[in-house]
Structures are given as C-alpha cells and as structure tokens.
Amino acid sequence: MKVQDVFEFLNSQFPTALAEGFDNVGLLVGDKSATVTGILVCLDCTHTAIEKATEQGANLIVTHHPIIFSPLKNIRENSLVFKLIKNGISVISMHTNLDVAENGVNDCLCNALGFNNTEPLVCSDGYTIKLATIDECTAETLAKTVKTKLGYPVRYTDAGKKIKTVAVCSGSGGSFLYDAKNAADAFITADLKHNVFYDAENLGLSIIDGGHFATEDIVVEPLANMLKEKFANLTICTCHYTPIKFM
C-alpha cells in the first residue's frame, strides 16, 4: 500500500476539487510512492501527533488542517515539517473539501449533535454548510446540548424565540451569519468575534459558539474508521491533542 493509494481513496470520498481557492490540500509532505506502514488521523499535525505516529509505527498522518498553509520562509530543526521529513512521515491534509463533502466535518458535527433531519445550505459565496430541523427548544437548551454532546465550553446569545431550524458550520463560520439568519432560527459554529454576537442579537438570531477544536475534532474517529474499513491490513490510530486549556 502506497501513500498515493491512500490519497486516491480520500480524494474519491472528499474530492480536493471541492476545496476553497485559498486552501492547500492533498499530499503536502512526503513521497507518494512510499509504502505505508501505518496511519495516524488527527485534526492538526502537532509535535504530539508526530511522536504518537512514530510510537505506533505510522509513517502517514492524515489531518484536517493543512500542515502547510502560508508560505514557508525556512525549515529549521525544530519545525514540524523538518521533523516529518527527518522521520520519513508523509502528511495528507483534507481541509475545506472535507468540511463540505458528504460524510465530512459538517455531517459529522450534525451526527454528534443528534441532528438527523438535515439538508445542504448553500451560502451566498457558494460555500455549503448544513441546515437542520430539530424538535422545538430554547437557545439555552440548545446551548446545553452543544456543550454536553461536544464536551466543550460554549458561548451563546438568545434571540428570545423558539428554535426549530439550525444552521450548522464547523470551525470558523462567523462570515455566514447573514446566510444563517435568512434560513434558520439559530446558528451553531465557532471562532466568533465579539461583534458577531451583537450582530446576531440585532438580527434576532440565536447563535452558539461551540469551539473550533470541538466542532471539527468530531470528524477524526469517523475518518479513521473509514480508513480502517478500506485498509484493514494497516494499523490506524488517532490523536485528539489540543494545546488549548480552560480555567
């Protein structure tokens, strides 16, 4: 099994053609012809993830966030890319294409939240998020559900009306506030700036920030299971490390 074989499978499920123009996806580090000894799946390629991959004998890491996004001006001895190359570890990153594709991050987030009745919501810039129809509830109840299901602190505003429809966008979705307002009673996303909460209140939209890590890390285990089913002969493990801590 070669690195290219794994990439081709992932690309068949989450086509890189779906990625946003600003994105950087695909095989970003390594040799496509290298034989795969094992795979580690994680949200971000960190020093912790590399150490775990090495311990598990995995020479391929599959991430959501690109290991290389902005141009690199140097590759020094303590950098992630240097460490990957030194240890012969390849990295495949599937980012915005994994967000929007079927069974991708947004679908996994809806599944984690128990939203079974969902449909695509195409935003004004063409990006696709999710629209879920749920049992009627309050913003406080929905916020508690997000906190409980994701196991992560939340921030929210309450527009003061019952919620039946929810727009869902994993990761940073503040730019889709008006798209959410035009389609739903509430919006679940992350990385919301201070002013977005005020804008949401003025629009009459309840909004819940579930945290970037929590709203995206939920794809790691399903993605690993998909790879296990396809490549049953390989050792496939996961890493859920984040440096973010709360007091």
Image (cartoon, rainbow, N blue to C red):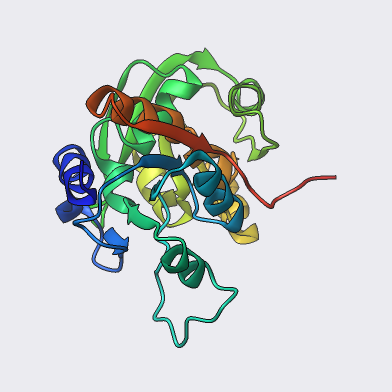
x and y, in percent, of residue 80 in the image:
52, 67
Horizontally, residue 152 falls left or right of residue 5, namely: right
x and y, in percent, of residue 140 in the image:
67, 25
Residue at x-position 45% and y-position 63%:
84
Residue projecting furthest to the top: 135
In this view, 232 is above or below 16: above
Q: Residue 67 occupies which quadrant of the picture?
A: bottom left
Q: Quadrant of the N terminus?
A: top left
x and y, in percent, of residue 48 in the image:
61, 51
Residue at x-position 50% and y-position 39%:
56
Q: Quadrant of the C terminus?
A: top right
Residue at x-position 51% and y-position 67%:
83
Horizontally, residue 204 falls left or right of residue 246, namely: left
221, 238: nearer the viewer:
238
> Can residue 25 be seen in the rendering of this structure?
no
Horizontally, residue 56 falls left or right of residue 242, namely: left
